[in-house]
Image (cartoon, rainbow, N blue to C red):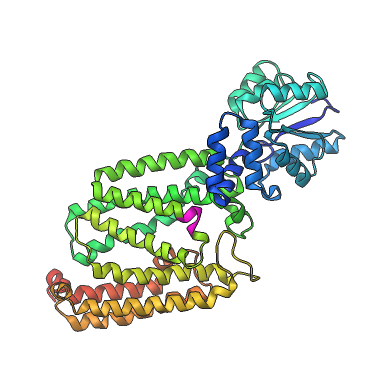
């Protein structure tokens, strides 16, 4: 590198491990979805103006945007050598200036201004006018940056190995930096640990005492479809919650919030997962597909708006859990009784309350949680809602035990009543642990890891199997 030549840094995907156009789009969807869609549809062919309008709608907090530490290290080294550092980006001037201010790289900024889209040839021309041809070193990350590298001196290439090879072949000095994207981070963005919640699809088969191989295989396929659907929604949820996640002690390490996976890759992954979901669902029939589509539609509405609405949020969580049970019945071809749905819904109301109680336990002030409608003052009301859910579930279970349907499945009615005890113990224990902040952020996942809780659930299931006469049928006692 020329010793005193300025270092010019592209911002999106180079200095930052994210793209501010996509950041603005998703932040805008979260804050003003209708306005954001209208702006995108009206100005999709005028990129400079579109970026200016989205920057206005989104109002990004640029202090939170993830920085590429290797590029930052190069910038600091350049400053140590007495060289000036400048930012050049196709993003809007308002955002680039904010990044420059936050980073301390307060040299000249080159950016789109609502009229000119500062990208490719436009950026190259602006840099040559300011520094002269060959009078600057440039760091970029996209094929379009070849137009700038050709006009500069030394090249810093981030995550573009093909372009780096081409520049070396032309005898240029190249510093290559990996963009840091790893397959494990892409998998982590899909939240595979959440797939365990789809074990709820098995409940209708267990409740119907149907242990034939064919329906279990169908439900297993349904679990795969629901896992892909859930992952696609988690991606959308994370993209909508980028700023909220970045101020959270743990969530700031999520792949999109931290910049480990780009927003562009996340959007592509969402499309792929949606096609996988619909493809598998089509094999399981129109009823199952309709339930999956409904699940995804409610989940999208939840991610974009409903999760910010106090109390509605918990009801929607319970609805999404219940839809998994309905989907399991559709995939397995078994009947799911109205009593079962009415029984499990208040259970899921309790578990939804537990989820929010767990998050609120760590709250340090009375402000609402980022991206949520709850504050520390809502802990007691959530606790009461959880108690109401428990009472409702136990009453409905007792009423179910008196029905002809229950009598046909469970000849030993007294044992069925006795099962109310471990059920109530498990639910109360979950609620208390949530109130004390001793759970993970998802109660279903916690329940499947909790050894004591699993013991209670297995005892309950064994008791109900015995009441149904299954132990006698299987083992002769």
Total numbered badges shown on the rendered structure: 0
- x, y percentage for residue 183? 50, 41
- x, y percentage for residue 106? 81, 40
Q: Is residue 206 visible?
A: yes
Magenta segment's dominant SS is helix
In the image, residue 88 sits, relative to residue 65, either above or below, namely above
- x, y percentage for residue 80? 85, 38
Magenta region: 302-306
What residue do we see at 47% from left, 46% from top?
A: 187
In the displayed image of the protein, which residue is found farthest to the top? 170
Quadrant in which the C terminus appears? bottom left
From the viewer's perspective, is 234 left or right of 251?
Answer: left
Q: Is residue 304 magenta?
A: yes
In the depicted view, which residue is nearer to us: 285 or 200? 285
What residue do we see at 77% from left, 38% from top?
A: 75
What residue do we see at 58% from left, 24% from top?
A: 162
What residue do we see at 67% from left, 15% from top?
A: 170
Q: Is residue 344 magenta?
A: no
In the image, residue 97 sits, relative to residue 296, either above or below, namely above
Quadrant in which the N terminus appears? top right
Q: Is residue 192 visible?
A: no
From the viewer's perspective, is 458 left or right of 432?
Answer: left
In the depicted view, which residue is nearer to us: 367 or 348? 367
From the viewer's perspective, is 89 left or right of 188?
Answer: right
- x, y percentage for residue 95? 70, 41
Q: Quadrant of residue 12?
A: top right
């Amino acid at each position: 590198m020329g010793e005193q030549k300025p270092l010019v840094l592209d911002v999106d995907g180079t200095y930052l491990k994210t793209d501010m156009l996509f950041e603005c789009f998703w932040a805008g969807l979260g804050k003003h979805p209708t306005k954001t869609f209208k702006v995108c549809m009206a100005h999709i062919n005028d990129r400079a103006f579109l970026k200016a309008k989205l920057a206005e709608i989104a109002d990004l907090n640029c202090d939170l945007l993830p920085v590429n530490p290797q590029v930052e290290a190069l910038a600091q080294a350049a400053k140590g050598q007495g060289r000036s550092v400048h930012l050049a980006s196709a993003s809007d001037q308002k955002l680039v200036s904010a990044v420059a201010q936050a980073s301390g790289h307060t040299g000249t900024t080159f950016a789109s201004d609502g009229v000119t889209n500062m990208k490719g040839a436009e950026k190259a021309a602006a840099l040559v006018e300011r520094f002269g041809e060959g009078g600057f070193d440039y760091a970029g990350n996209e094929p379009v940056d070849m137009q700038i590298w050709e006009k500069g001196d030394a090249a810093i290439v981030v995550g573009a190995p093909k372009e780096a090879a081409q520049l070396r072949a032309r005898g240029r000095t190249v510093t290559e930096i990996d963009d840091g994207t790893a397959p494990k981070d892409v998998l982590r963005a899909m939240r595979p640990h959440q797939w365990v919640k789809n074990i709820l699809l098995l409940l209708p088969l267990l409740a119907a005492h149907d242990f034939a191989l064919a329906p279990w295989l169908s439900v297993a396929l349904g679990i795969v479809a629901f896992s892909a659907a859930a992952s696609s929604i988690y991606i959308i949820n994370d993209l909508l919650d980028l700023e909220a996640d970045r101020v959270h002690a743990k969530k700031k390490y999520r792949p999109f919030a931290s910049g480990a996976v780009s927003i562009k890759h996340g959007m592509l992954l969402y499309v792929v997962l949606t096609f996988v979901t619909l493809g598998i669902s089509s094999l399981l029939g129109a009823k199952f597909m309709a339930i999956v589509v409904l699940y995804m539609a409610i989940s999208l509405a939840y991610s974009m708006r409903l999760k910010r609405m106090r109390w509605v949020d918990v009801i929607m969580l319970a609805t999404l859990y219940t839809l998994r049970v309905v989907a399991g019945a559709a995939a397995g071809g078994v009947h799911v009784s109205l009593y079962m749905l009415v029984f499990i819904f208040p259970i899921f109301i309790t578990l939804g309350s537990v989820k929010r109680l767990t998050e609120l336990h760590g709250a340090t002030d009375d402000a609402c949680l980022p991206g949520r409608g709850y504050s520390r003052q809502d802990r007691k009301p959530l606790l009461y809602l959880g108690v109401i859910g428990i009472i409702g579930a136990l009453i409905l279970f007792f009423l179910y035990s008196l029905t002809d349907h229950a009598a046909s499945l469970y000849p030993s009615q007294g044992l069925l009543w006795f099962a109310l005890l471990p059920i109530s113990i498990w639910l109360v224990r979950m609620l208390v642990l949530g109130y004390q902040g001793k759970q993970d952020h998802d109660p279903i996942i916690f329940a499947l890891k909790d050894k004591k809780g699993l013991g209670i659930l297995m005892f309950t299931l064994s008791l109900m199997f015995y009441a149904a006469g299954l132990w006698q049928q299987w083992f002769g006692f």
